[in-house]
Image: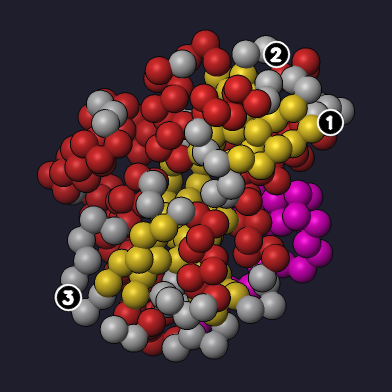
Amino acid sequence: MSWDGVLGRVSFINCDPVFHTIPEGWQVLSAPPSWLTGHLLRKDCITAPIPTADYASNMGKLSLIRDIGIVGRESVGSVLLFGNRPIETMRDIALPSDSSTSNMLMRWILKQRSLDPKYVKMGPDMDSMLDECDGALIIGDRAIAAAINNPDLVRMDLGREWAEITGLPMVFGVFAARKDSDGHSIIRARELMLRNYNIFLEQEEVRNIVISDASKKVCLSVERVGEYYDNEVSNLLGPESIKGLSVFLEEVCEVESDPLWFDHV
């Protein structure tokens, strides 16, 4: 299949409401967040939700698709700092190798607190990370499960911390496409993903199926997954989220130009 018929998606459940129904003629490429950027640049897919920090590094090659993203409402529940000691006394923090946005956000938040621990990039396994470092940043489905199993080790929800500092939602992922992409294919992809998400929001039967499937996939309760979708993560990129995106790009990524959008979408 041609690359313009392939949709990239994060392998975490934060994208399940967008990809629950894929019609004939489309394929889905599932990968960790940081891998999707490479897939997109290599023309393995027409669009993908990539880490916001990766978009900042590739603004010359990529544009954003409107109205859709991976957004923390306040507490995001799936980007968490764990540790055996208070944050102020952490000498080193292990950062996961599968997301650039969360890693940059972690550094920025602690800089606001005048803290400068040593950062060590590691594979995303909390036990191994905490064997080596005082703190461990965990993202995605692993973070949700780890918080349930180790509630006493949760030291910070980065989505909540960002919201408290800026008063804005945190956009962890943006749906991007190469600037040389076919406009018609981008329109079709955007319409499909937004339609899926709106159906998830509006049709209780579909919502229940998505939640049930997601809970089985990551071995979490239906109640916890429902809470995650209702209160912590959203796939709509509205005006307040766009403000949050602009602040992240400017303050954290030190990008001076505004985000670039597909004007024909």
Q: Position of residue 257 (x, y in %)?
A: 77, 68
Amino acid residing under circle 1: Asp
Residue where numbered disc 2 is placed: 86
The disc, 3 or 1, on the residue closer to the chain's N-terminal end is: 3
* Residue drawn where x is 38% and y is 52% of the image: 11
Residue mark closest to the camera, 3 vs 1: 1
Q: Nearer the viewer, residue 160 or 52?
A: 52
Q: Nearer the viewer, residue 63 or 231?
A: 63
As drawn, the label of residue 24 is 3
The disc, 3 or 2, on the residue closer to the chain's N-terminal end is: 3
Callout 3 secondary element: loop
Q: Which residues are magenta?
A: 240-264
Residue where numbered disc 1 is placed: 116
Q: Nearer the viewer, residue 56 or 120?
A: 120
* Residue drawn where x is 52% and y is 38% of the image: 124
As drawn, the label of residue 8 is none
